Amino acid sequence: MRYELMLPYQIRKAIAENWPVVLPLGVLEYHGEHMAVGMDTLAVVKMLELFEKEADIVILPAFYYGAASYAVAPPEGNGSVQVGGRALAPFAEELFYSLLRIGFRNIHAIIHHQTENFAAGMPTDLAFKTAGRQAIFRFLEKERGEGWWGSETMAGYYAEHAEGGNFFNWIQVHPLMPTVTDGQYPFDHAGIGETSLMLALCPEAVDAGHFADNTGWYTATAPEASMELGQKGVAMILDHLREMLTA
Ligand SMILES: [Zn+2]
């Protein structure tokens, strides 16, 4: 369900049943002359809309204003919007803290932008990961007081941790694509992989009439994009979402 359309009784049901609450996290960034600047975020939004047909999830309004960087192209006339990680982290902490106050304990942010470096992290995902940790510590300390972890009630912490019970799983940040694709699908920026994904998910975000205007190396493979290849990516990502988003 889209969070902005939910009524309080529906929100209480989602909390009681521990539905995944998912933030589509992304950027607005230059993706060549043939593709829309929202590509990275649109891919997450559209995939979650597909996944929602088979699973009970809450989809938060998308956050498009991450750290795109100007690494691909300067913003003037090209459209990239850059908000740095230092500005994102305090915002994200407040957002996550507020979601914990509501009662959600199964919160996820999903990002596609720059996720080829997901294990080490890049500015947007690192800011949201840090923010999630900070929000959880702050929330637990407010609820339980200082010394909460050292108290007797926590004596089973390591055993529960080994079983997968862990406060720090309350907020997780994931890449949209599986980290290891085993060559199943090309990962790129505005090339055949991303363009095919958009053709499958959001064809209005691609204009084949502008392939010829591209000059960047990273767009060289874009004209080979197809909806058929995009559908393979969609199937792969759906499998990945099924693994990540469980009640
Ligand atoms: Zn992209």
Image (cartoon, grey):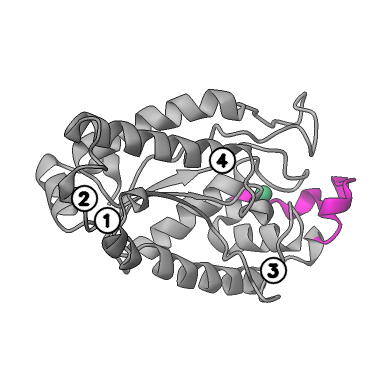
Disc with the residue nearer the chain's start (1 vs 4):
4
Amino acid on which disc 4 is placed: Leu
Amino acid on which disc 1 is placed: Tyr
**Mark 1, secondary structure of its residue:** helix
Q: Nearer the viewer, mark 2 or mark 4?
A: 2
Q: Is residue 96 visible?
A: no
The x, y position of residue 88, in whole percent, is 52, 28
Amino acid on which disc 3 is placed: Ser
Q: Residue at x 70, y 47 (%)?
A: 35
Does the magenta-highlighted stretch encompass residue 241? Answer: no
Disc with the residue nearer the chain's start (2 vs 3):
2
**194 and 119: which is toward the camera:** 119
Contact between labelled residues 4 and 3, with CB atoms less than 8 Å apart = no
Q: Which mark is residue 154?
A: 2
**Mark 2, secondary structure of its residue:** helix
Disc with the residue nearer the chain's start (2 vs 4):
4
Disc with the residue nearer the chain's start (3 vs 1):
1
Q: Nearer the viewer, mark 2 or mark 3?
A: 2
Contact between labelled residues 3 and 2, with CB atoms less than 8 Å apart = no
Q: Residue at x 24, y 30 (%)?
A: 146
**204 and 2: which is toward the camera:** 2
Which image quadrant is residue 96 in? top left
**Residue for badge 3:** 226
